[in-house]
Amino acid sequence: MKRLAGRIILLWGWRRALVAFFAGALAVLAQAPYDFFAVGFVSFPLLVWLLDGATGEASDGWFRRLRPAFAIGWWFGFGYFLAGLWWIGS
């Protein structure tokens, strides 16, 4: 488990965004009508691991330090709401 967490923490660039997007889309399965709540125990730790690896340099300004965490949250939310809205539309 530590090896998996380490690999996810060290992801960078488009791979980090892609994992965040799919983790958000996966989190939709924990909601109704699927009610597969165990997926929440996978998708949200992925989000936490991604956020754990999102650090900027201490010498940078506060915006540059927070930008990677903002991007991860945005991609997670985009995947979550895109999958959720698809379900509502169908």
Image (cartoon, rainbow, N blue to C red):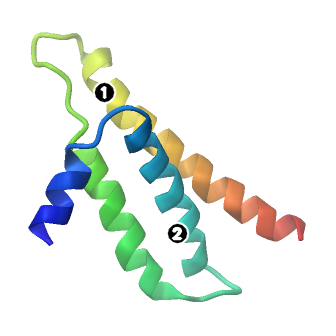
Q: CA distance from mark 2 to mark 1?
A: 24 Å
Circle 1 sits in a helix, a strand or a loop, which is it?
helix
Q: Identify the image quadrant of residue 86.
A: bottom right
The kind of residue tagged 2 is Ala
Q: Residue under circle 1?
A: 66
In the rendered view, would you say 17 is above or below 41?
A: above
Residue 12 drawn at (x, y percent): 31, 35
The C terminus appears in which quarter of the rendering?
A: bottom right
Circle 2 sits in a helix, a strand or a loop, which is it?
helix
Residue 14 drawn at (x, y percent): 44, 35
The N terminus appears in which quarter of the rendering?
A: bottom left
Apparent side of residue 66 relative to residue 9 in the rendered image (left or right): right
The kind of residue tagged 1 is Leu
Could you classify mark 1 by the number of other residues whose Cα lies within 10 Å: few (under 14), some (14-19), or many (20 or more)? some
Apparent side of residue 79 relative to residue 56 in the rendered image (left or right): right
Q: Residue at x 52, y 43 (%)?
A: 75
Q: Residue at x 66, y 55 (%)?
A: 81
Q: Residue at x 23, y 10 (%)?
A: 61
* Nearer to the camera, 4 or 51: 4
Residue 19 drawn at (x, y percent): 43, 52
In the rendered view, would you say 15 is above or below 31?
A: above
In the rendered view, would you say 37 is above or below 58?
A: below
In the rendered view, would you say 25 is above or below 55?
A: below
Q: Identify the image quadrant of residue 53.
A: top left
* Nearer to the camera, 16 or 54: 16
Q: Residue under circle 2?
A: 27
Residue 76, numbered circle: none
Q: Nearer the viewer, mark 2 or mark 1?
A: 2
Residue 32 drawn at (x, y percent): 67, 83
Mark 2 touching mark 1, by CB under 8 A? no
Q: Earlier in the sequence, mark 2 or mark 1?
A: 2
Q: Residue at x 34, y 36 (%)?
A: 69
